Image (cartoon, grey):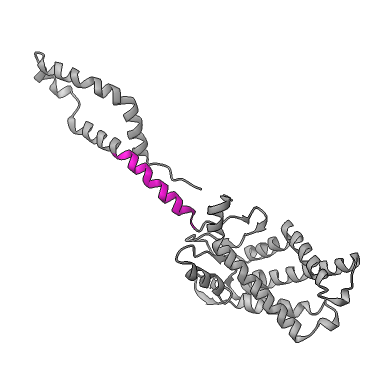
Amino acid sequence: MTFRAPSLALITALALSLALGPAAMAAEPATTRVADAPGAEANAGSLPDAPVISRLQAQISAAPSDVQNHVPAAKAADDGMQTKRILYIIPNFRAVSADQHLPPQTVKEKFNTAALDSVDYSSFIFVAIQSGVAQARNATPEFHQGAAAYGRYYWHTYADYVNENLWVEFILPAALHQDSRYYTLGRGGFGKRFAYAVSRIAITRTDSGRSVFNASEIFGAGAAAGISSLYYPSQERTFSKTFGLWMTSLAIDGGSSLFKEFWPDINNKFFHQRN
Protein backbone atom coordinates (compact mmCIF):
# COMPACT_ATOMS: atom_id res chain seq x y z
CA MET A 1 0.00 0.00 0.00
CA THR A 2 1.36 3.40 -0.96
CA PHE A 3 0.66 6.39 1.30
CA ARG A 4 0.93 9.86 -0.12
CA ALA A 5 3.36 12.13 1.72
CA PRO A 6 1.90 15.24 3.49
CA SER A 7 2.61 18.55 1.84
CA LEU A 8 5.70 20.56 2.71
CA ALA A 9 3.56 23.31 4.23
CA LEU A 10 1.84 20.82 6.50
CA ILE A 11 5.11 19.34 7.73
CA THR A 12 6.45 22.81 8.35
CA ALA A 13 3.34 23.79 10.33
CA LEU A 14 3.58 20.69 12.51
CA ALA A 15 7.27 21.25 13.17
CA LEU A 16 6.67 24.87 14.11
CA SER A 17 3.83 23.89 16.43
CA LEU A 18 6.15 21.57 18.34
CA ALA A 19 9.11 23.91 18.40
CA LEU A 20 7.38 27.24 19.00
CA GLY A 21 4.28 26.20 20.92
CA PRO A 22 5.77 26.54 24.45
CA ALA A 23 7.62 29.70 23.46
CA ALA A 24 4.45 31.28 22.12
CA MET A 25 2.61 30.50 25.32
CA ALA A 26 5.38 32.04 27.40
CA ALA A 27 5.53 35.11 25.18
CA GLU A 28 1.94 36.24 25.92
CA PRO A 29 2.48 37.59 29.45
CA ALA A 30 5.80 39.08 28.35
CA THR A 31 3.95 41.00 25.67
CA THR A 32 1.57 42.39 28.30
CA ARG A 33 4.47 43.56 30.45
CA VAL A 34 6.12 45.27 27.50
CA ALA A 35 2.91 47.12 26.73
CA ASP A 36 2.84 48.49 30.28
CA ALA A 37 6.45 49.59 30.21
CA PRO A 38 7.54 53.11 29.21
CA GLY A 39 8.29 53.43 25.49
CA ALA A 40 6.15 50.44 24.60
CA GLU A 41 4.56 52.34 21.76
CA ALA A 42 7.97 52.97 20.23
CA ASN A 43 8.88 49.30 20.39
CA ALA A 44 5.51 48.06 19.11
CA GLY A 45 6.78 47.85 15.55
CA SER A 46 9.33 45.20 16.58
CA LEU A 47 6.64 42.78 17.92
CA PRO A 48 5.35 39.92 15.72
CA ASP A 49 2.26 40.74 13.70
CA ALA A 50 -0.92 39.15 15.06
CA PRO A 51 -2.12 37.98 11.62
CA VAL A 52 1.04 35.85 11.19
CA ILE A 53 0.39 34.03 14.47
CA SER A 54 -3.26 33.56 13.56
CA ARG A 55 -2.37 32.00 10.23
CA LEU A 56 0.12 29.66 11.90
CA GLN A 57 -2.48 28.58 14.47
CA ALA A 58 -4.99 27.98 11.69
CA GLN A 59 -2.52 25.73 9.84
CA ILE A 60 -1.78 23.79 13.02
CA SER A 61 -5.46 23.27 13.86
CA ALA A 62 -6.17 22.10 10.30
CA ALA A 63 -3.24 19.66 10.20
CA PRO A 64 -4.88 16.55 11.74
CA SER A 65 -7.86 16.58 9.39
CA ASP A 66 -5.53 17.10 6.43
CA VAL A 67 -3.43 14.10 7.40
CA GLN A 68 -6.55 11.98 7.77
CA ASN A 69 -7.68 12.96 4.30
CA HIS A 70 -4.66 11.14 2.88
CA VAL A 71 -5.77 7.76 4.25
CA PRO A 72 -8.83 7.29 1.98
CA ALA A 73 -6.78 8.58 -0.95
CA ALA A 74 -4.09 5.99 -0.30
CA LYS A 75 -6.70 3.26 0.02
CA ALA A 76 -8.29 4.32 -3.26
CA ALA A 77 -4.89 4.17 -4.92
CA ASP A 78 -4.70 0.45 -4.06
CA ASP A 79 -8.07 -0.32 -5.67
CA GLY A 80 -7.46 -2.13 -8.95
CA MET A 81 -3.70 -2.37 -8.31
CA GLN A 82 -2.23 -5.44 -10.01
CA THR A 83 0.85 -7.37 -8.89
CA LYS A 84 3.48 -8.93 -11.16
CA ARG A 85 2.54 -12.36 -9.85
CA ILE A 86 -0.55 -13.80 -8.22
CA LEU A 87 0.30 -15.35 -4.84
CA TYR A 88 3.96 -14.84 -5.76
CA ILE A 89 3.76 -17.76 -8.23
CA ILE A 90 1.32 -17.30 -11.12
CA PRO A 91 2.60 -14.87 -13.80
CA ASN A 92 0.53 -11.71 -14.10
CA PHE A 93 2.79 -9.78 -16.47
CA ARG A 94 0.03 -8.75 -18.90
CA ALA A 95 -2.33 -7.26 -16.31
CA VAL A 96 -2.53 -3.46 -16.21
CA SER A 97 -3.75 -1.73 -13.04
CA ALA A 98 -7.00 0.24 -13.14
CA ASP A 99 -6.68 3.77 -14.60
CA GLN A 100 -3.03 3.16 -15.48
CA HIS A 101 -1.98 4.62 -18.82
CA LEU A 102 0.86 2.88 -20.65
CA PRO A 103 2.54 3.55 -23.99
CA PRO A 104 1.72 1.19 -26.88
CA GLN A 105 3.41 -2.21 -26.85
CA THR A 106 6.32 -2.54 -29.23
CA VAL A 107 6.80 -5.73 -31.25
CA LYS A 108 9.72 -6.61 -28.99
CA GLU A 109 7.58 -6.20 -25.87
CA LYS A 110 4.89 -8.46 -27.33
CA PHE A 111 7.48 -11.13 -28.05
CA ASN A 112 9.02 -10.78 -24.59
CA THR A 113 5.61 -11.16 -22.96
CA ALA A 114 4.86 -14.36 -24.88
CA ALA A 115 8.33 -15.71 -24.11
CA LEU A 116 8.08 -14.89 -20.39
CA ASP A 117 4.70 -16.60 -20.13
CA SER A 118 6.13 -19.66 -21.90
CA VAL A 119 9.42 -20.18 -20.07
CA ASP A 120 8.54 -18.91 -16.61
CA TYR A 121 9.26 -21.52 -13.93
CA SER A 122 5.58 -21.71 -13.01
CA SER A 123 4.75 -22.80 -16.57
CA PHE A 124 6.65 -26.05 -16.12
CA ILE A 125 4.88 -26.70 -12.82
CA PHE A 126 1.40 -26.21 -14.26
CA VAL A 127 2.22 -28.26 -17.35
CA ALA A 128 3.39 -31.06 -15.06
CA ILE A 129 0.07 -30.96 -13.18
CA GLN A 130 -2.00 -30.83 -16.36
CA SER A 131 -0.04 -33.73 -17.84
CA GLY A 132 -0.65 -35.84 -14.76
CA VAL A 133 -4.37 -35.13 -14.86
CA ALA A 134 -4.54 -35.92 -18.59
CA GLN A 135 -2.73 -39.20 -18.08
CA ALA A 136 -4.99 -40.14 -15.17
CA ARG A 137 -8.02 -39.49 -17.41
CA ASN A 138 -6.38 -41.41 -20.27
CA ALA A 139 -7.14 -38.35 -22.42
CA THR A 140 -4.98 -39.63 -25.30
CA PRO A 141 -5.10 -43.46 -25.24
CA GLU A 142 -2.40 -43.66 -27.92
CA PHE A 143 0.12 -42.40 -25.35
CA HIS A 144 -0.53 -45.47 -23.14
CA GLN A 145 0.52 -45.44 -19.46
CA GLY A 146 3.73 -45.37 -17.44
CA ALA A 147 6.70 -43.01 -17.17
CA ALA A 148 7.29 -42.85 -20.94
CA ALA A 149 3.63 -42.05 -21.47
CA TYR A 150 3.83 -39.23 -18.93
CA GLY A 151 6.75 -37.80 -20.91
CA ARG A 152 4.62 -37.82 -24.06
CA TYR A 153 1.77 -36.10 -22.24
CA TYR A 154 4.20 -33.54 -20.85
CA TRP A 155 5.84 -32.39 -24.08
CA HIS A 156 2.55 -32.33 -25.99
CA THR A 157 0.92 -30.22 -23.26
CA TYR A 158 3.90 -27.86 -23.13
CA ALA A 159 3.91 -27.53 -26.92
CA ASP A 160 0.20 -26.59 -26.79
CA TYR A 161 0.99 -23.99 -24.13
CA VAL A 162 3.83 -22.31 -26.04
CA ASN A 163 1.97 -22.57 -29.33
CA GLU A 164 -1.02 -20.59 -28.05
CA ASN A 165 1.11 -18.02 -26.25
CA LEU A 166 2.99 -17.20 -29.44
CA TRP A 167 -0.17 -16.83 -31.54
CA VAL A 168 -2.31 -14.96 -29.00
CA GLU A 169 0.34 -12.74 -27.39
CA PHE A 170 2.89 -12.14 -30.15
CA ILE A 171 2.24 -13.17 -33.77
CA LEU A 172 -1.28 -11.82 -34.32
CA PRO A 173 -1.00 -8.82 -31.94
CA ALA A 174 2.14 -7.74 -33.80
CA ALA A 175 0.57 -8.28 -37.23
CA LEU A 176 -2.78 -6.64 -36.37
CA HIS A 177 -1.37 -3.90 -34.08
CA GLN A 178 -3.46 -5.10 -31.13
CA ASP A 179 -2.64 -4.84 -27.45
CA SER A 180 -2.48 -8.24 -25.73
CA ARG A 181 -2.55 -6.82 -22.19
CA TYR A 182 -5.52 -7.01 -19.83
CA TYR A 183 -6.69 -3.57 -18.67
CA THR A 184 -8.36 -3.83 -15.26
CA LEU A 185 -11.70 -2.02 -14.90
CA GLY A 186 -11.49 -1.97 -11.09
CA ARG A 187 -14.73 -0.07 -10.41
CA GLY A 188 -18.47 -0.59 -10.62
CA GLY A 189 -20.62 -3.45 -9.40
CA PHE A 190 -19.82 -7.14 -9.59
CA GLY A 191 -22.04 -7.71 -12.63
CA LYS A 192 -20.47 -4.87 -14.58
CA ARG A 193 -16.93 -6.02 -13.88
CA PHE A 194 -17.80 -9.67 -14.54
CA ALA A 195 -19.28 -8.81 -17.95
CA TYR A 196 -16.31 -6.57 -18.75
CA ALA A 197 -13.75 -9.28 -17.93
CA VAL A 198 -15.51 -12.00 -19.94
CA SER A 199 -16.02 -9.65 -22.90
CA ARG A 200 -12.25 -9.19 -23.22
CA ILE A 201 -12.23 -12.47 -25.11
CA ALA A 202 -14.02 -10.69 -27.96
CA ILE A 203 -12.89 -7.07 -27.37
CA THR A 204 -9.40 -5.67 -27.07
CA ARG A 205 -7.47 -2.45 -27.69
CA THR A 206 -5.40 -1.47 -30.65
CA ASP A 207 -1.95 0.01 -30.18
CA SER A 208 -3.58 3.42 -30.60
CA GLY A 209 -6.09 2.73 -27.79
CA ARG A 210 -9.27 2.02 -29.79
CA SER A 211 -11.59 -0.84 -28.83
CA VAL A 212 -11.83 -3.48 -31.59
CA PHE A 213 -12.73 -7.12 -32.18
CA ASN A 214 -10.15 -9.33 -30.47
CA ALA A 215 -8.98 -11.19 -33.55
CA SER A 216 -5.68 -11.99 -31.84
CA GLU A 217 -7.46 -14.05 -29.17
CA ILE A 218 -10.18 -15.68 -31.29
CA PHE A 219 -8.13 -16.53 -34.35
CA GLY A 220 -4.90 -17.04 -32.43
CA ALA A 221 -6.44 -19.72 -30.22
CA GLY A 222 -7.98 -21.32 -33.32
CA ALA A 223 -4.66 -21.33 -35.18
CA ALA A 224 -2.90 -22.87 -32.18
CA ALA A 225 -5.56 -25.60 -31.95
CA GLY A 226 -5.21 -26.37 -35.65
CA ILE A 227 -1.42 -26.56 -35.49
CA SER A 228 -1.52 -28.82 -32.42
CA SER A 229 -3.30 -31.51 -34.44
CA LEU A 230 -0.15 -31.88 -36.54
CA TYR A 231 1.91 -33.35 -33.70
CA TYR A 232 -0.79 -35.49 -32.07
CA PRO A 233 -1.56 -39.07 -33.18
CA SER A 234 -3.65 -39.32 -36.34
CA GLN A 235 -6.62 -40.65 -34.38
CA GLU A 236 -6.75 -37.30 -32.55
CA ARG A 237 -6.83 -35.22 -35.74
CA THR A 238 -10.56 -34.75 -35.97
CA PHE A 239 -12.57 -31.57 -36.34
CA SER A 240 -14.50 -32.18 -33.12
CA LYS A 241 -11.33 -32.55 -31.05
CA THR A 242 -9.63 -29.57 -32.66
CA PHE A 243 -12.75 -27.44 -32.18
CA GLY A 244 -13.01 -28.65 -28.57
CA LEU A 245 -9.41 -27.61 -27.92
CA TRP A 246 -10.13 -24.20 -29.47
CA MET A 247 -13.17 -23.61 -27.24
CA THR A 248 -11.29 -24.89 -24.18
CA SER A 249 -8.46 -22.41 -24.83
CA LEU A 250 -10.95 -19.53 -25.08
CA ALA A 251 -12.70 -20.62 -21.89
CA ILE A 252 -9.39 -20.80 -20.00
CA ASP A 253 -8.37 -17.34 -21.24
CA GLY A 254 -11.78 -15.96 -20.27
CA GLY A 255 -11.43 -17.41 -16.78
CA SER A 256 -7.94 -15.93 -16.56
CA SER A 257 -9.28 -12.45 -17.41
CA LEU A 258 -12.03 -12.85 -14.83
CA PHE A 259 -9.56 -13.77 -12.12
CA LYS A 260 -7.26 -10.89 -13.06
CA GLU A 261 -10.13 -8.42 -12.76
CA PHE A 262 -10.95 -9.43 -9.19
CA TRP A 263 -7.43 -10.33 -8.04
CA PRO A 264 -6.75 -6.80 -6.65
CA ASP A 265 -9.88 -7.08 -4.46
CA ILE A 266 -8.94 -10.57 -3.27
CA ASN A 267 -5.38 -9.48 -2.62
CA ASN A 268 -6.35 -6.36 -0.66
CA LYS A 269 -8.78 -8.31 1.51
CA PHE A 270 -6.80 -11.47 2.26
CA PHE A 271 -3.17 -11.45 1.15
CA HIS A 272 -1.89 -7.83 1.02
CA GLN A 273 0.76 -8.71 -1.57
CA ARG A 274 2.53 -5.56 -2.78
CA ASN A 275 4.38 -6.59 -5.95
Residue 101 appears at what percent x and percent y? 49, 61
User: Can residue 19 be seen?
Assistant: yes
| Along the viewing direction, whichever of 145 and 64 lies nearer the viewer | 145
In the rendered view, tell whether residue 76 sits above or below residue 127: above
Residue 152 is a magenta residue: no
Whether residue 75 is in magenta: the answer is yes
Q: State the residue at coordinates (74%, 56%).
A: 121
Residue 181 visible somewhere in the drawing: no
Q: Is residue 271 left or right of residue 58?
A: right
Q: In this view, does 23 lie above or below 269?
A: above
Q: Residue 32: x, y in percent?
A: 14, 19
Q: Which residue lies furthest to the top in this view?
A: 38
From the viewer's perspective, is residue 157 above or below residue 239? above
Foreground of the two, 38 or 199: 199
Looking at the image, which residue is at 28% across and 21% down? 23
Question: Residue 142 is drawn in which quadrant?
Answer: bottom right
* Residue at the extreme bottom of the image, as rendered: 239
Q: Main secondary structure of the magenta part?
A: helix
Q: In this view, does 170 lie above or below 64?
A: below
Residue at image point 63% right, 56% down: 85
Q: What stretch is highlighted in magenta?
A: 62-79
Which of the 4 quarters of the picture holds residue 56?
top left
**Would you say 14 lies left or right of 251 here?**
left
At which x and y percent is residue 257?
59, 67
Question: Is residue 121 shown left or right of residue 148?
Answer: left
Task: Give x and y (percent) for residue 17.
Answer: 32, 30
* Image quadrant assignment for residue 129: bottom right
